[in-house]
Amino acid sequence: MSQKPSVGQIVHYVSYGTPPREDGVQAYASECRAAIVTEVDTSDTVGLCVLNPTGQFFNRTVTHDEDEKHGGTWHWPERV
């Protein structure tokens, strides 16, 4: 990772989404959400304040995942 996170930076958090129902469909899919870095544990693990349309939540141990972007991880915002 070329850029290192620091407190106050904006990153993307990937939500988990809901578990698949019996028909295999998720009620809510995994999505990127805006998040603010609240603490830096290591360059790969940070604490975040995740901003959702319906509120916010805090997570203190979120791992970096720039490639696969699995649920429960963070990555740098895409450049557009």
Image: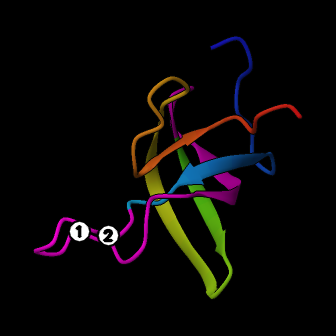
Question: Chief secondary structure of the magenta span?
Answer: loop
Magenta-drawn segment: 17-45
Q: Which residue is mark 1?
A: 19
Q: CA distance from mark 2 to mark 1?
A: 6 Å
Hey, which quadrant is residue 54 in on the image? bottom right
Residue 30, position as x, y percentages in the image:
45, 58
Quadrant into which the C terminus falls: top right
Q: Residue at 57% of width from left, 26% of height from top?
A: 43
Q: Which residue is mark 2?
A: 26
Q: Is residue 77 left or right of residue 23?
A: right
Q: Is residue 42 left or right of residue 23?
A: right
Q: Residue at 23% of width from left, 68% of height from top?
A: 19
Q: Pointer 2: residues within 10 angstroms few (<14), some, or many (20+)?
A: few
- Residue furthest toward the left? 22
Q: Secondary structure at mark 1?
A: loop
Tags 2 and 1 in contact by the CB under 8 Å rule? yes
